[in-house]
Image: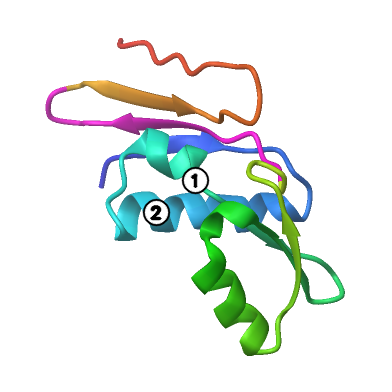
Amino acid sequence: GRPVLVGGTPGGPNQVQWNFQILTDVLDLEMPLERAVAGPRWAWTEALHVNIESDFGRPVLESLAARGHDLSVLPPKGVGGRVQLIRLDPDSRQREGAGDPRINGSVLATMR
């Protein structure tokens, strides 16, 4: 019943997609914060076209294309986002933060 993650990203219609990807990486795949925040991203457009970063790897990209997805493969860090994320450990009160390498910035968490 206590918060364990605080974060977000600007990005208009892509904001929800990027937050979903980060939460899936951290909560379901148990990735370290820095890896999740720095990892490759994708974003659907209104026309069901998918912008996807090339560092997903050729097997993933080819599999998606073979399934009929309309892809634009962009360079690493090319889809966008500015994710900032802080993990809160309610027992130890430790904070862990990660800032998106797509921008210059940092994450700061204070204890009270």
- The residue lying furthest to the left in this view is 91
The x and y percentages for residue 44 are 73, 66
Query: Which residue is rendered at x = 60% and y = 77% of the image?
Result: 62
Q: Which residue is mark 1?
A: 39
The image quarter in which residue 54 lies: bottom right
- Image-based side of 52 in relation to 112, left or right: right
The image quarter in which residue 50 lies: bottom right
Residues drawn in magenta = 80-92
Identify residue type, mark 1.
Gly
The image quarter in which residue 65 lies: bottom right
Q: Image height check: is 63 above or below 76?
A: below
Q: Are marks 1 and 2 in contact (CB under 8 Å)?
A: yes
Separation of residues labelled 1 and 2 (CA atoms): 9 Å
Q: Which residue is mark 2?
A: 25
Mark toward the start of the polypeptide (1 vs 2): 2
Query: Which residue is rendered at x = 33% and y = 33% of the image?
Result: 87
Classify mark 2: residues with Cα within 10 Å, few (<14), some (14-19) or many (20+): some
Identify residue type, mark 2.
Asp
Q: Image height check: is 25 above or below 48?
A: above
Q: Quadrant of the C terminus?
A: top left
Query: Which residue is rendered at x = 70% and y = 38% of the image?
Result: 10
